[in-house]
Image (spheres, rainbow, N blue to C red):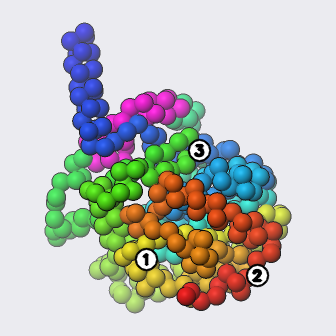
């Protein structure tokens, strides 16, 4: 037993040293359990941030608290569609606070797939979470804050095997790889980009060039007639508009507020998103059908001059400066002093 314990300790220390040499450092895993913990912290009048990873990286909790008078609860989920969380808040009859909702149209209007399942997994975890799972999460956070190799998204055996360069073949299509850990996460789910990713180098390139295949729509399935498939997609997107309008209405009827925001992106990713989902399309229609105010970063010089190092998210220092400039616009939108026409004017 002593020999086994010593061998385990030596192996663990060696693996920790190796992982730190690769650039990993101790930080929390963003799990459905951590999301559930923050969802349970929502009060009836809370300010809640929902959406995708841009809201996770770009919105600084300290700046929002200083500017709006309440500390927000961070419920944005990387790689997710914001609608299920919006609906969850709308269904919570006690909630009458403020929702700041980041919109990446490619994900917000995704009819199925990971964007929806990522959000639903977090919501379902909260609804069905056991005492043992809550205790495991608390213990896990204590360890993750001190040990670098506890990265369930990167460093488990299954994830490491998944990095093997296996090509597509009949009956087995290999999807695009997810980005590696390039951020720290705290107990409030505030994500900050690693300094190593904010400067040119291998980590930045690995993250940057991974976005285009991940955010490009997959080809239609071959086992469904194309016209039938496209008809189903159209119905799902139309339902997302009407369902979003209904969710916003329920929140507003209780005295709550919803503000949609479009956060910065850069480079080739910006070209892809502007082509696939032009501003005059889903964004404009979402604001029109919900009647909610929207803030588009392109409209304001103080919000549009940022460069995302890996095309999709702001660096940690820029996220603070950006949020400081965004807060006055959020305050006006929440107070109802922003004209809807101003939020949907054509981009320059």
The residue carrying mark 3 is: 188
Q: Is 324 included in the stretch rendered in magenta?
A: no
Is 227 situated above or below 101? below
Left or right of residue 84: residue 24: left
Left or right of residue 162: residue 106: right
Q: Is 142 included in the stretch rendered in magenta?
A: yes
Is 315 situated above or below 41? below
The residue carrying mark 2 is: 339
Left or right of residue 248: residue 199: left
**Pointer 3 with pointer 1, Cβ within 8 A:** no
Residue 43 in the image: state x and y as whole percent.
75, 48
Badge 3 marks a residue whose secondary structure is loop
Residue 270 numbered tag: 1
Looking at the rendering, the stretch of residues picked out in magenta corresponds to: 138-159
Q: Earlier in the sequence, mark 3 or mark 1?
A: 3
Badge 1 marks a residue whose secondary structure is helix
Q: CA distance from mark 3 to mark 2?
A: 33 Å
């Amino acid at each position: 037993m002593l020999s086994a314990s010593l061998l385990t300790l030596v192996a663990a220390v060696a693996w920790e040293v190796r992982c730190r040499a690769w650039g990993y450092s101790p930080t929390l895993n963003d799990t459905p359990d951590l999301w559930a913990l923050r969802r349970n912290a929502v009060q009836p009048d809370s300010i809640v941030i929902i959406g995708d990873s841009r809201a996770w990286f770009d919105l600084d909790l300290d700046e929002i608290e200083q500017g709006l008078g309440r500390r927000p609860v961070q419920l944005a989920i990387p790689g997710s569609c914001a609608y299920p969380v919006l609906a969850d808040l709308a269904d919570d009859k006690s909630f009458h606070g403020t929702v700041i909702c980041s919109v990446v149209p490619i994900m917000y209007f995704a009819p199925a797939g990971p964007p929806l399942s990522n959000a639903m997994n977090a919501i379902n975890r909260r609804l069905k979470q056991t005492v043992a799972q809550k205790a495991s999460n608390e213990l896990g956070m204590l360890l993750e804050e001190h040990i670098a190799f506890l990265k369930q998204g990167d460093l488990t055996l299954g994830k490491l095997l998944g990095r093997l360069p296996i090509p597509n073949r009949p009956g087995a299509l290999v999807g695009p790889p997810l980005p590696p850990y390039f951020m720290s996460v705290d107990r409030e789910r505030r994500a900050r980009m690693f300094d190593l990713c904010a400067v040119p180098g291998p980590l930045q390139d690995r993250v940057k060039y991974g976005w285009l295949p991940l955010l490009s729509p997959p080809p239609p399935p071959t086992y469904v007639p194309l016209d039938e498939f496209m008809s189903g997609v159209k119905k799902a997107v139309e339902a997302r508009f009407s369902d979003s309008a209904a969710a916003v209405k329920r929140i507003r009827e209780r005295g709550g507020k919803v503000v949609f925001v479009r956060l910065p992106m850069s480079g080739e990713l910006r070209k892809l998103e502007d082509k696939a989902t032009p501003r005059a399309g889903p964004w404009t229609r979402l604001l029109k059908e919900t009647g909610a105010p929207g803030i588009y970063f392109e409209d304001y010089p103080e919000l549009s001059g940022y460069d995302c190092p890996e095309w999709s998210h702001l660096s940690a220092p820029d996220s603070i400066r950006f949020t400081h400039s965004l807060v006055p616009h959020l305050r006006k939108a929440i107070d109802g002093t922003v004209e809807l026409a101003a939020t949907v004017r054509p981009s320059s």
